[in-house]
């Protein structure tokens, strides 16, 4: 069949008179029945459905513990990763905390509200406690295209300082197999979603300069 397509049955100029399967060809039969129909009308092109447009707030949560010492030693780049459900889109892969938002509510205020709610519910981090929040800023947008979804990710960077055991703080009452704190060097080895890999490629290089940034803003 492939050879036929590559030789006789071209898309625009099929050589039906030489074709060894012409007696079985439905397109040719239909073209004989109706002069308005040509063999090149087949196969019918089914118009592709427009991809759904989704919008997500994505938060690169960096956790700093004992900030002064750790930044000096360059060890404070721990990132919070969440495992996606075992079924459905991107099943079982890891991503930064992400929450879908309504298209009409992608303004920073609403995105932050949604993310705060999600973090509170997921890891019991109360972002409104100012003492924990060192930095929070929007860092850009990325579009990721799936076969049926066009996902626009609004990405923000959030740096939190947590006293005590960071792992414990993030796993309060949670299933630890679904949350992970990983340092920058280990992120690549995680099974990440391709969208998040895109975010990392653009953002983490900037985030890794963060220790100096923190030192400068204290
Ligand atoms: S007869 Fe059918 S299969 Fe053969 S070349 Fe024409 S269109 Fe193609």
Image: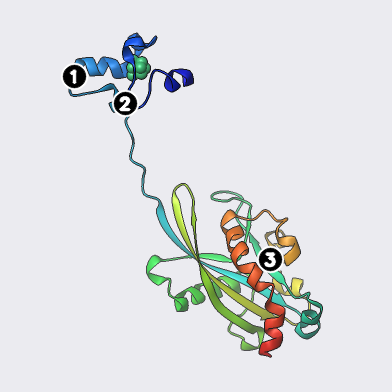
Mark with earlier residue (3, 1)? 1
**Residue labelled with disc 1:** 34
Q: CA distance from mark 2 to mark 1?
A: 14 Å
Query: How busy is the neighbourhood of tag 2: few (under 14 within 10 Å), some, or many (20 plus)?
Result: some
Q: Is residue 1 above or below residue 108?
A: above
Q: Position of residue 173 (x, y in %)?
A: 69, 68
Q: Is mark 2 within 8 Å of ligand 1?
A: yes
Instruction: Label 2, secondary structure: give it.
Output: loop
The numbered dot on residue 42 is 2
Instruction: Label 3, secondary structure: give it.
Output: loop
Is residue 190 found left or right of 129 in the rendered image? right
Residue 2 can be seen, yes or no:
yes
Image point 55% across, 65% down: which residue?
A: 98
Q: Position of residue 26 (x, y in %)?
A: 31, 17
| Viewer-proximal residue among 80 and 35 | 35
Q: CA distance from mark 2 to mark 3?
A: 56 Å
**Residue labelled with disc 3:** 174
Query: How busy is the neighbourhood of tag 1: few (under 14 within 10 Å), some, or many (20 plus)?
Result: few
Instruction: Label 1, secondary structure: give it.
Output: loop
Image point 28% across, 22% down: which residue?
A: 39
């Amino acid at each position: 069949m492939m050879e036929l397509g590559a030789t006789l049955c071209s898309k625009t100029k099929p050589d039906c008179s030489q074709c060894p399967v012409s007696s079985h060809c439905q397109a040719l039969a239909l073209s004989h029945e109706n002069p308005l129909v040509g063999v090149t009308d087949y196969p019918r092109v089914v118009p592709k459905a427009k991809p759904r447009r989704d919008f997500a707030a994505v938060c690169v949560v960096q956790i700093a513990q004992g900030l002064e010492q750790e930044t000096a030693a360059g060890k404070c780049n721990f990132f919070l990763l969440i495992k996606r459900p075992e079924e459905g889109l991107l099943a079982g892969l890891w991503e930064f905390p992400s929450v879908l938002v309504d298209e009409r509510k992608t303004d920073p205020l609403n995105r932050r509200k949604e993310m705060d709610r999600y973090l509170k519910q997921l890891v019991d981090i109360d972002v409104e406690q100012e003492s924990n929040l060192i930095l929070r800023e929007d860092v850009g947008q990325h579009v990721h295209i799936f076969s049926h979804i066009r996902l626009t990710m609004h990405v923000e960077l959030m740096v939190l300082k947590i006293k005590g055991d960071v792992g414990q703080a993030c796993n309060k009452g949670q299933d630890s197999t679904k949350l992970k704190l990983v340092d920058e060097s280990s992120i690549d080895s995680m099974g990440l979603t391709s969208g998040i890999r895109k975010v990392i490629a653009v953002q983490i290089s900037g985030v890794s300069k963060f220790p100096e940034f923190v030192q400068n803003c204290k």
